[in-house]
Amino acid sequence: MTTINTRFPPGLTIIALLILAFLALFLVIPVVTVFYTAFTDFDGSLTLGHFGAFFHQPLLEEAFYNSLYVAVMSVIFASLIAIPLAYFTVRFRFRGALIIQTLGVLPLIMPPFVGAVALQLIFGRSGTVNLLLQDWFNFSVPVMDGLNGVIFVESLHYFPFILLNLTVALRNIDGAMEEAALNMGAKGWRLFRRVIFPLALPGYVAGASLVFVKVFDDLGTPLVLGITNMLAPQAYLRITQVGLDDPLGYVISVLMIAFSILALWLSARVLKDKDFSTIQKGGNSLQQRTLNKTESILAYGWIFLVLLLVLSPHIGVLLLSFATVWSYAPLPDGYTLSHYAAVFTHSNDMIMNTLLYCSLAAGIDIVLGTAIAYLILRTRLPARRWLDWIASAALAVPGIVLAIGYLRTFRGLEIPGTDTMLTSTWIIIMLAYSVRRLPYALRSCIAALQQINISLEEAAASVGATRRRIIQRVVVPLMAGGILAGFVTSFITAAVELSATIMLVTRDSDAPMSYGIYLYMQSASGRGPGAALGVMAIVVVAIGTYISHLIVERNAMRTRPARTE
């Protein structure tokens, strides 16, 4: 049978070089520029003096330790929410487990800086909860004060990363391990602590490292809450107030990248040289136990409280979007549709800009993702894995750092044939979106191509089809589900991007929805329209998430082998 030539023809060589040039120009060089600026003096000589100056400024040193503190505490509190929720829904049999897991993921479809405002109205000093506690019991809980507010918001927003990864890990544990432990007398808390959780540790560590990185790099939530003594806000303030030549802004950027990489490295290091495999492939999962009446009441009560807490940002944003006035009162004084009318009247450009930027960025991502996946899995390109590693490295680059790199690298660069600077156009925003979201599309495309048996391509080659025709008529159609899922994932995550957006928007006419929400939220009078715009962003992301899941499910059903009788 004719096999596909897996050597590297000139056409694919050119494609590989073009992809490498794109990644170098819009990812590697901007990041290298940030590092170079942080480690060089004004005369171009290498120096560590900027880092010494950083740690000799009390405000910046405080910001560094605050960011570490907030990230670590957010992981801890996110774990306290996610671990019991994952364990209960996997370990016990009760109605509504699937609904509970679905609702538990809802925080991810809301930008954290949007939820921050809603949580202030519900849990702030003059919020719903504290007003009621003060009225009924004469005390209040400082949940949203200072750094506690950032930790609270980030924990509620990012705990689904732990929940999702841990749920999968728990379901993959071989039930034989549990049976062996039970036969040796382990049960209850001891069984969970000594057997079940250690076997699910890879899932937990993967989720916890993502939470740390996301919280450590977040810019929008601290800014909305008025907290500036953290690294991301300080990087933003140094560059916007002092200027692009301020070396301390670049030092902060380097520290943010370094700790993101360190967190991911430590997560891999923790699991190194440890065996988490099960005895038998495809063995039975953990046995689900039916709760008795008392246990059911306690479990449902606890889960209800957790989900009420988790869904409180969504409830708060929805109420705020309809509220006439909501201040120093448990609930709004009245309700109106005027905020939505204002959004549709004055923010149409923001909505259209979001659709344009995110569509173009997602389109670039699936083209690059499909090409890189094919080069990795279907060719023998030397060092082809470098394409995967470079593209995936965008996960470790905070949005604000990439934006700073763009402003420094491309300042003074005009678009050919025009007198317009690249950094003053919407194109730079769209490029930042595409680079930041490329890893998501790439993973979807690789997964889709891995499910296509190469024998299908070999069969096409055996009847004379060229490589180009095989890709067009066989590979791409069979990858369609994964490609569409990658497009939707890139689109919806770019739609709520703020860190890069806030640095790169130079004109209000070029602003997308995320920037508009942030501007609205800066004043009490603008919070209603901001919440309405936030609700619209949530709806867009929710619809996109649903479509993505639908595409993945249909693709899985299409590729699933037919059952023979």
Image (spheres, grey):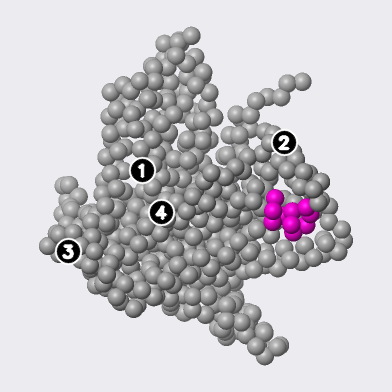
Separation of marks 1 and 2 at Cα, in angstroms: 37 Å
The disc label shown at residue 283, or none:
2
Residue at numbered disc 4: 261
Residue at numbered disc 3: 41
Magenta residues, as a range? Answer: 186-195
Apparent side of residue 329 relative to residue 372 in the rendered image (left or right): right
Q: Tell me whether the residue at label 3 lies in contact with that at label 1, contact meaning CB atoms closer than 8 angstroms.
A: no
- Rendered view: 49 above or below 451: below
Q: Quadrant of residue 466?
A: top left
Q: Helix, strand or loop at disc 1?
A: helix
Q: Helix, strand or loop at disc 4?
A: helix
Image position, residue 417 (x, y; %): 16, 47
Nearer-N-terminus badge (2/3): 3
The residue that appears at 42% across and 17% down in the rendered structure is 4
Q: Tell me if residue 192 is in the magenta stretch.
A: yes
The residue that appears at 31% across and 32% down in the rendered structure is 16
- Rendered view: 428 above or below 227: above
Q: Main secondary structure of the magenta part?
A: helix
Q: Helix, strand or loop at disc 2?
A: loop
Residue at numbered disc 1: 390
Image position, residue 526 (x, y; %): 45, 75
The residue that appears at 43% across and 69% down in the rendered structure is 67
Q: Tell me whether the residue at label 3 lies in contact with that at label 4, contact meaning CB atoms closer than 8 angstroms.
A: no
Q: Residues within 10 Å of mark 2 (few under 14, many from 20)?
A: few
Residue ranking furthest to the front: 184
Nearer-N-terminus badge (3/4): 3
Q: Tell me if residue 147 is in the magenta stretch.
A: no
The kind of residue tagged 1 is Ile
Apparent side of residue 323 relative to residue 346 in the rendered image (left or right): right
Separation of marks 2 and 3 at Cα, in angstroms: 60 Å
Nearer-N-terminus badge (3/1): 3
The residue that appears at 38% across and 35% down in the rendered structure is 385
